[in-house]
Amino acid sequence: MKSAEGDGLLETLRARFEKNTHRHQGITWRAVVARLEGNAAALKALQAMETSGGEPDVIGVERSGHVTFCDCAAESPSGRRSLCYDREALDARKEAKPKGSAVEMAAEMGIELLTEQQYRELQQLGEFDLKTSSWVETTSDVRSLGGALFCDRRYGRVFVYHNGAQSYYAARGFRGRLRV
């Protein structure tokens, strides 16, 4: 990543960090920057999260010092919608194939799909996906039957649903996280 581009990303992340302190109490921006310095892979992943509309922000820090970023855009990131769940689902579609899959796009970006538990934890920090929904990591028992899980927030509650993994909708994307 070019230095000017990296500086612009860090300034965007810093402004978001300072605006949303309720998401990361007890964490300093200095500690975050220390984890990012010299970590080209993390900066590249964060740039991909930002560019695709994820609005990544720090949501936690581990005892080890590792910092966790997560997509904190109000709705499922706009640049990551209309995707089926994974490659197997994409290959199973005979026609009207989507542009790709959530699992593959996350891997290409260098991030992980949220688990159902991580999605619920994110919802404790704000209200997300009031109009959209997000694919979440699906256990092998559900996936082996052809399904995949997604979540959203409606009526003040977080809901987990199932759908055929090959399905895709304009209002369904995915949220990711990055541990640095």
Image (spheres, grey):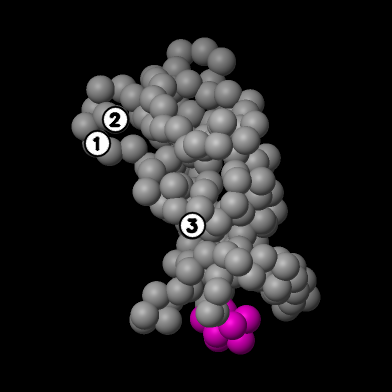
Q: Earlier in the sequence, mark 3 or mark 1?
A: 1
* Residue 156 in view, yes or no: yes
Look at the image and tell me whether residue 37 can be seen.
no
What amino acid does circle 2 point to? Arg
Left or right of residue 72, residue 140 in this image: left
Give the residue pinned by disc 1: 140
Amino acid at circle 3: Arg
Q: Which residue is mark 3?
A: 177
The residue shown at (55%, 74%) is: 25
Q: Label 2 near label 1: C-beta < 8 Å?
A: yes
Would you call the spot at circle 2 few (<14 residues within 10 Å), some (14-19), or many (20 or more)? Answer: some
How far across and how far down the image is residue 96, in percent? Answer: 56, 15
Asked if residue 72 lies left or right of residue 63, the reply is right
Name the residue nearer the viewer: 53 or 100: 53
> Which residues make up the magenta segment?
28-38
**Labelled disc at residue 143:** 2
